[in-house]
Image: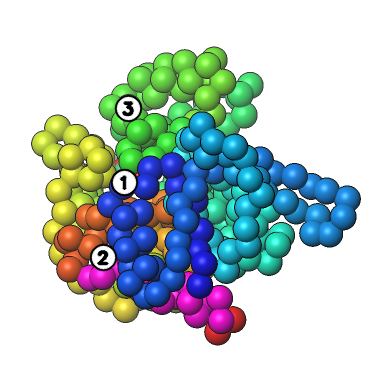
């Protein structure tokens, strides 16, 4: 097969692992930067054409691919999803379809989709820019978590110890035209959460993450440490249902243990492979490529 990976940083562990795994399985794989594409909607069939301009090179018409693996970061969501939509319009299977990918990249819209599927999430509010910050903050508990809608790796997540801090942070972000959601802080989780790697209808790997001293975010990029964890069938089912609620083939589902049970914090459409493979000892990349092969075959 001829595969395409959309990614800006081919040297990242996840991209290297997927490339190596695809090549070992006998596939060819190109890694292209979504921001170097030109997308054209044209009169004649095929209506969707894609051009690519390599670094300092001449643009060329993109050849056809058998499937695409989106691995672009939050800085490239808009162009990346646009490229993905163009490829999907050409009936090229995507390992995460463009609409689901875009949905997962919006923390508020994805929480709405999860809640609509009856999946437990923390109490969260999202206020319009003209709704008074003080009144919005009253709707959640204190301490309060504030989140920008498109953050990742813990960046864009803020903990306000007091209501007054939450109000002033919210006012500042709103004035800067940065939409933000407010959420109950799940303090009883003890700065620890669970990452589930979902492929299709299976949790293929899990890990527990704990934030470093003085930190409230458990993300590995913020210094969180990982350890193995075994989940029950019902716990895994929450992660699978969350991925399915957003329509994702591949997802990194973050779960947090609250007094009332496990809650879904967020669902990542392009979850990292490094820490989950190293912690669990499971070859996630091979399972992703195997799943993609089945998808291409229409199985
Ligand atoms: N409501 C919350 N209560 C307690 N901790 C939270 C809450 N929301 C986020 N966190 C902590 O912050 C981390 C990052 O939040 P998350 O929503 O997963 O955003 P990101 O996309 O940046 O990973 C989580 O892994 C968790 O440790
Ligand atoms: Mg997260």
Quarter-of-image position of residue 159:
top left
- Sequence-earlier tag: 3 or 2: 3
Q: Main secondary structure of the magenta part?
A: helix
Quick check: 134 above or below 285?
above
* Disc 1 to disc 2, C-alpha distance: 24 Å
Residue 133: percent from left, percent from top:
51, 22
Which residue is label 2 attached to?
206
- Give the residue displayed 48% in from the left and 20% down from the top: 173
Label 3 to label 2: alpha-carbon separation? 29 Å
Q: Is residue 103 visible?
A: no
Which label number is shown at residue 160? Answer: 3
Q: First in sequence: mark 1 or mark 3?
A: 1
Indicate yes or no: mark 2 CB to ligand 1 under 8 Å: no
Point out the image quarter for the C terminus.
Answer: bottom right
Instruction: Indicate whether residue 290 is drawn in magenta.
Output: yes
Give the residue number, with chain letter if any, for mark 1: 11
Point out the stretch of residues depicted in magenta. 282-297
In the image, farthest residue toward the bottom: 299
Question: Where is residue 297 drawn, in percent x and y?
Answer: 56, 81
Query: Measured along the vertical axis of the image, is residue 88 above or below residue 266?
Result: below
Q: Does mark 1 have its CB less than 8 Å from ligand 1? A: no
Q: Could you tell me which residue is drawn at 45 percent across and 66 percent down?
A: 28
Kind of element beneath mark 1: loop
Query: Is the C-beta separation of discs 3 and 2 under 8 Å?
Result: no
């Amino acid at each position: 097969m001829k595969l395409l990976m959309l990614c800006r940083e081919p040297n990242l562990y996840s991209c290297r692992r997927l490339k190596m795994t695809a090549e070992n399985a006998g596939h060819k794989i190109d890694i292209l930067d979504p921001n170097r594409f030109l997308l054209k909607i044209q009169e004649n069939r095929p209506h969707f054409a894609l051009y690519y301009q390599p670094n300092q090179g001449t643009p060329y018409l993109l050849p056809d691919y058998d499937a695409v693996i989106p691995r672009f970061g939050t800085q490239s969501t808009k162009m990346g999803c646009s490229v993905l939509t163009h490829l999907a319009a050409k009936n090229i299977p995507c390992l995460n379809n463009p609409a689901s990918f875009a949905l997962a990249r919006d923390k508020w819209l994805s929480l709405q989709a999860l809640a609509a599927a009856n999946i437990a999430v923390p109490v969260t509010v999202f206020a319009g820019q003209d709704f008074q910050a003080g009144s919005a903050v009253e709707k959640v508990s204190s301490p309060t978590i504030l989140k920008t809608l498109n953050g990742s790796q813990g960046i864009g997540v803020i903990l306000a110890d007091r209501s007054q801090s939450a109000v002033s942070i919210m006012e500042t972000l709103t004035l800067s035209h940065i939409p933000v959601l407010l959420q109950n802080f799940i303090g009883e989780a003890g700065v620890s959460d669970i990452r589930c790697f979902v492929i299709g209808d299976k949790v293929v790997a899990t890990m527990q993450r704990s934030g470093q001293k003085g930190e409230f975010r458990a993300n590995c990029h913020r210094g969180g440490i990982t350890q193995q964890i075994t989940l029950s069938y019902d716990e895994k089912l929450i992660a699978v249902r969350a991925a399915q609620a957003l329509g994702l083939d591949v997802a990194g589902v973050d779960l947090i243990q609250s007094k009332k049970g496990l809650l879904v914090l967020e669902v990542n459409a392009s979850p990292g492979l490094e820490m989950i493979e190293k912690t669990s000892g499971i070859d996630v990349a091979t399972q992703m490529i195997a799943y993609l092969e089945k998808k291409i075959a229409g199985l």
